Image (tube, rainbow, N blue to C red):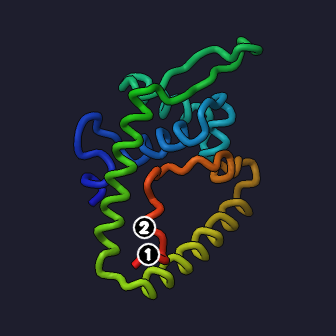
């Protein structure tokens, strides 16, 4: 499933790289510090994560316009295209998996998942108050055509 839904074709991205690319596309430009905090990882880990995407042509780094000591990272046009293609592929896998669920099942599943994610967010927030709440940085959806998967669909 992981191979099918995340990166079956070139470029071969692991789940961490896909998370990194998702975050870059969702937010736009980040300083490396903001990016590391959003993922709750060490700056050196963030630098390595970004370097792999830069090497693949999916992200780029530049000097911050007002502070030359800071680096800004963002997804490239190719990175945004790859992320969109893979997001749609993941969405298609979810839609297919939900085909056997009736509307009541979908509603219950959505309610339970929302409760689970809220609980998980709370647990993570309590454990690492230094992390940025990256879910709230943008209202731009990662899955551009996800509306038809909502729990109220038949």
Q: Look at mark 1 in the image and give the residue it sits on.
A: 153
**Residue 11: quadrant of the picture:** top left
| Residue under the image location 54 percent in, 37 percent down | 24
- Vertical position of residue 79 compared to residue 87: above or below: above
Q: Position of residue 90 (x, y in %)?
A: 35, 55
Horizontal side of residue 57 vs 60, given as left or right: left
| Residue under the image location 59 percent in, 68 percent down | 117
Horizontal side of residue 85 vs 128, given as left or right: left
**Residue sitting nearer the eye, 153 or 89:** 153
Answer few, some or many: residues within 10 Å of disc 2's Cα (few below 14, many 20 plus, some between 14 and 19). Answer: some
Count how many numbered circles sit on residues in the image. 2
Instruction: Point out the image quarter for the C terminus.
Output: bottom left
**Residue 9: quadrant of the picture:** top left
Closer to the eye: label 2 or 1: 1
- Vertical position of residue 134 compared to residue 64: above or below: below
Q: Are marks 2 and 1 in contact (CB under 8 Å)?
A: yes
**Residue sitting nearer the eye, 73 or 154:** 154
**Residue sitting nearer the eye, 37 or 9:** 9
Q: Secondary structure at mark 1?
A: loop
The answer to whether residue 51 is visible is no
Horizontal side of residue 3 vs 49, given as left or right: left
Q: Position of residue 127 (x, y in %)?
A: 70, 60
Q: Position of residue 21 (x, y in %)?
A: 47, 39
Instruction: Point out the image quarter for the N terminus.
Output: bottom left
| Residue under the image location 48 percent in, 34 percent down | 49
Q: Position of residue 17 (x, y in %)?
A: 42, 40
Q: Look at mark 2 in the image and give the residue it sits on.
A: 149
Q: Secondary structure at mark 2?
A: helix
Q: Residue furthest bottom?
A: 104
CA gap, disc 2 and disc 1: 7 Å
| Residue under the image location 56 percent in, 34 percent down | 46
The answer to whether residue 67 is visible is yes
């Amino acid at each position: 499933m992981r191979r099918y839904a995340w990166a079956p074709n070139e470029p071969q991205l692991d789940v961490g790289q896909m998370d990194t690319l998702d975050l870059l596309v969702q937010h736009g430009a980040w300083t490396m510090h903001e990016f590391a905090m959003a993922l709750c990882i060490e700056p050196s880990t963030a630098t390595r994560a970004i370097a792999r995407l830069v090497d693949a042509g999916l992200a780029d780094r530049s000097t911050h316009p007002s502070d030359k000591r800071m680096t800004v990272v963002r997804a490239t046009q190719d990175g945004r295209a790859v992320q969109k293609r893979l997001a749609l592929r993941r969405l298609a896998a979810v839609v297919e998996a939900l085909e056997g669920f009736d509307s009541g099942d979908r509603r219950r599943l959505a309610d339970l998942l929302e409760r689970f994610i809220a609980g998980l967010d709370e647990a993570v927030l309590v454990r690492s108050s230094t992390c940025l709440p990256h879910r709230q940085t943008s209202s731009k959806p990662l899955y551009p055509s996800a509306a038809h998967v909502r729990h109220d669909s038949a």
